[in-house]
Image: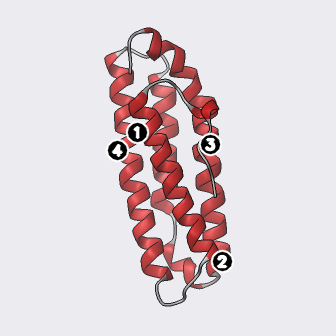
Amino acid sequence: MFHWQAEFELGITSIDNQHKKLIEIGNRINELLEYQDDEDDYNQILEVLEELKSYTDYHFKTEEELFLKYNYPEFHLHKKEHDNFIRYIDSIDVDSYEEDKTLFIRDLLQKIINWIFHHIITSDYMYKDYLVRLGAK
């Protein structure tokens, strides 16, 4: 399980809440790894991947709207990271799931959680002070 920690907070409530939701989705992937059930696994992994993609799109759109609203100077670099992650999610070969379920879920979980935490504590921290200073909440 992955837990939200105070050092992840950016001070922008909407973004912090969305980051918490992304971690919650990561925890659902972790649960799939811990409690595999051959009959329901495939449908559950499809559901969580769809939720991850949908919520990630929503989250990135929220951040990007703030960047445009406050004229964030690193908008294009940050958006490129977003686009790369969306491409990664789109490239996940769900058909390879049947080859080795445990490996598939473990690899997916590692990549997603690593990306989320790395993105929050590095890339997102780069815009934190800028947006907060300009009034983003």
Whether residue 116 sits left or right of residue 71 in the image: it is right
Does residue 124 lie above or below 56 as drawn? Answer: above
| Amino acid marked by disc 1 | Phe
Q: Secondary structure at mark 3?
A: helix
For marks 3 and 1, the one nearer the N-term is 1
Q: Disc 4 versus disc 2: distance between alpha carbons?
A: 29 Å
How many neighbours does mark 4 have within 10 angstroms: few (below 14), some (14-19), or many (20 or more)?
few
Whether residue 136 sits left or right of residue 4 in the image: it is left
For marks 4 and 3, the one nearer the N-term is 4
| Amino acid marked by disc 4 | Tyr
Classify residue 43 by image quadrant.
Answer: bottom left
- Place of residue 101 in the rendered image (x, y in percent of width and height, measured from the top left): 61, 80
Q: Disc 2 versus disc 1: distance between alpha carbons?
A: 29 Å
Q: Disc 3 versus disc 1: distance between alpha carbons?
A: 15 Å
The dot on residue 60 is 1
Q: Residue at x 58, y 30 (%)?
A: 123
- Place of residue 52 in the rendered image (x, y in percent of width and height, measured from the top left): 44, 56
Q: Disc 4 versus disc 3: distance between alpha carbons?
A: 18 Å
For marks 2 and 3, the one nearer the N-term is 2
Which residue in the structure is indicated by mark 4? 58
The answer to whether the residues at label 2 and label 1 have Cβ atoms under 8 Å apart is no
Which residue in the structure is indicated by mark 2? 102
Q: Residue furthest bottom?
A: 39
The dot on residue 122 is none
For marks 2 and 1, the one nearer the N-term is 1
Q: Disc 1 versus disc 4: distance between alpha carbons?
A: 6 Å
The answer to whether the residues at label 1 and label 4 have Cβ atoms under 8 Å apart is yes
For marks 4 and 2, the one nearer the N-term is 4
How many neighbours does mark 2 have within 10 angstroms: few (below 14), some (14-19), or many (20 or more)?
some
Which residue in the structure is indicated by mark 3? 117
| Amino acid marked by disc 3 | Phe
Q: Residue at x 58, y 54 (%)?
A: 112
